[in-house]
Image: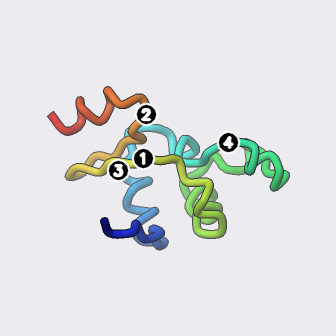
Amino acid sequence: MKKATRPDRAALESIVAKLEDPAADLVRKDSQFAKLGLKEEDYQTPEAVVELLLQRPALLQRPVVVKGDKAIIGRPKDRVRQLLS
């Protein structure tokens, strides 16, 4: 199995542009987010989200599924089935 590579700026910008959800949804707001002292309101714009995910790739919500000109966060799993069908 090939190890996934971290998305670079171009990949993140492409995902954000195709994303059906708000760009802020790409950021995991978990215990690590809180531990870093980050605030949700600071990461609402596509540009802020891309910058944060370049600095902290572990905060990228997964899975992200891209098909053509659409991208979704693959939770719940039914969303993936809908996109791929």
Tell me which label, 1 or 2, sits earlier in the chain.
1
The residue that disc 1 covers is: 63
Q: Position of residue 66 (x, y in %)?
A: 29, 51
Q: Position of residue 2 (x, y in %)?
A: 32, 69
Residue contact between numbered discs 4 and 2, judged by CB atoms under 8 Å: no
Name the mark nearer the viewer: 3 or 1.
1
Distance from Cα at disc 1 to Cα at disc 2: 7 Å
Could you say which disc has been placed on residue 8 in the image?
none
* Quadrant position of the C terminus in the picture: top left
SS at mark 4?
loop
The residue that disc 2 covers is: 75
Tell me which label, 3 or 4, sits earlier in the chain.
3
Q: Position of residue 23 (x, y in %)?
A: 52, 46
Tell me which label, 4 or 2, sits earlier in the chain.
4
Residue contact between numbered discs 3 and 4, judged by CB atoms under 8 Å: no
The type of residue carrying mark 3 is Lys
SS at mark 1?
loop
Residue contact between numbered discs 1 and 2, judged by CB atoms under 8 Å: yes
Name the mark nearer the viewer: 2 or 3.
2
Q: Position of residue 60 (x, y in %)?
A: 55, 53
Mark 3 is surrounded, within 10 Å at the Cα level, by few (under 14), some (14 to 19) or many (20 or more) other residues, namely some
The residue shown at (65%, 64%) is: 56
Could you say which disc has been placed on residue 29 in the image?
4
Distance from Cα at disc 3 to Cα at disc 4: 21 Å
Residue contact between numbered discs 3 and 1, judged by CB atoms under 8 Å: no
Residue that lies at the very extreme toward the front in this rendered image: 1
**Relative height, residue 78 to residue 42 (above, below):** above
